[in-house]
Amino acid sequence: MKDALVDPTLSLEERALLARGIAEWGGSARCTQALAVAMGFASVADLLEGEGQRIWRAIAAHHPLSRADWRRALFATEIVFASDVAGSGVDWPTVSGLDDTRTIVVLRELQRKLARL
């Protein structure tokens, strides 16, 4: 079922990275309307205050999400971490408190678990 809720087995570190990735869009990242839509949100406001907040809360509370929601969280985290144009980029360690090297390792683990849900 397309909209069924799923609860993949994620470590605390993986959940923390996804939650930080979503939250960082309200920090130093610079999301455009087009980018928010490309990530699967209706608008920048939807990412920051609507669906993005709902997804962030569910991840933090260890609640299941739809496959689409997990993919949106992953994609938003990938962009905010890697992009210096739209995301936190080179400032990621400073603004997130997470080391670049460890972030890549955890992000790869998440990609293996979530990208093909």
Image: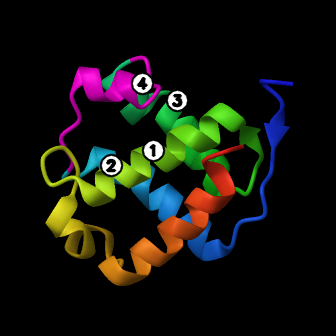
Residue 18 in picture, x, y percent from top left: 51, 58
Q: Is residue 1 above or below residue 57?
A: above
Q: Nearer the viewer's eye, disc 3 or disc 1?
A: 1
Query: Distance from label 2 to label 4 (Cα)?
Result: 17 Å
Distance from disc 2 to disc 3, alpha carbons, whole Å, reads: 17 Å
Q: Secondary structure at mark 4?
A: helix
- The kind of secondary structure element at disc 1 is helix
Q: CA distance from mark 2 to mark 1?
A: 6 Å
- Name the N-terminal-most of marks 1 and 4: 4
Q: Which residue is mark 4?
A: 46
- Answer whether residue 95 is magenta in the image: no
Task: Kindly identify which numbered label has been placed on residue 75.
Answer: 1
Q: Earlier in the sequence, mark 2 or mark 4?
A: 4
Percent x, y of residue 43: 35, 19
> Looking at the image, is 49 positioned above or below residue 19?
above
Q: Amino acid at mark 1?
A: Phe
Residue type, label 4: Asp
Q: Is residue 105 left or right of residue 116?
A: left
> Of all residues shown, which one is farthest toward the top?
42
Classify mark 4: residues with Cα within 10 Å, few (<14), some (14-19) or many (20+). some
Report the span colored magenta: 29-42
